[in-house]
Image (tube, rainbow, N blue to C red):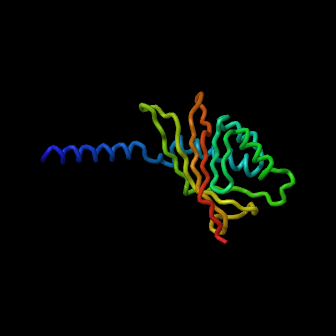
Amino acid sequence: MNQSIKSLLLCSIGILISGIATAQVDKTSELFKTLKAKDSILFKIGFNKCKVEQSAALMFDDLEFYHDSSGFSNSKKEFIEAMKSGICKEDNPEKVYRFLVEESLEVFPMFDNGELYGALQNGKHFFSTDKSMTYENSDNYALFSHLWIIEDNEWKLKRVISYNHVSKE
């Protein structure tokens, strides 16, 4: 076997091994369960029940929130103010609720020299003014990516990308 083929083979094996090492964690793992619980605090409590301060505790002050149709927030403060004056406004006649598409949730750990420092959480969610809506009947859904970072042994939300908002109408 010539040297270039050996090099190509070794490079391919390295890529395969690195891909395996950074694959999605199992849905029964502690990391997956922890970040799924954080997602629940953000949305079931913060978004759906408008207890915004509880979800704010999970965010870095320099939170960046990117939304494909409503723009960009450059801080936790800005994001929380937008929540309070928008979706969680007291006199909001059409409160929208967020629901996770459970089977879509994925978590990818991030390491620095073998030490876990963060994770990327991806999934699909849908929105409705009807609390009993199911994904199959929903007409408004999107994809999301959350970058979680460990700070002082706590998971905190650093970046949010909410994209591909689609209406079936």
Residue at image coords 67%, 51%: 71
Classify residue 138 by image quadrant: bottom right
Classify residue 149 by image quadrant: top right
Camera-side residue of 159 and 118:
159
Residue at image coords 63%, 48%: 66
Q: Is residue 155 left or right of residue 57?
A: left
Q: Is residue 139 left or right of residue 87?
A: left
Q: Position of residue 140 (x, y in %)?
A: 66, 64
Camera-side residue of 167 and 113:
167
Q: Position of residue 134 (x, y in %)?
A: 66, 64
- Outermost residue toward the left in this view: 1
- Outermost residue toward the top in this view: 152
Residue at image coords 42%, 32%: 114
Give the position of the C terminus as an image quadrant.
Answer: bottom right
Q: Position of residue 97 (x, y in %)?
A: 73, 57
Residue at image coords 71%, 44%: 79
Q: Position of residue 44 (x, y in %)?
A: 70, 50
- Outermost residue toward the bottom in this view: 169
Callout count: 0
Vertical order, 153 against 75 (above or below): above
- Outermost residue toward the right in this view: 91
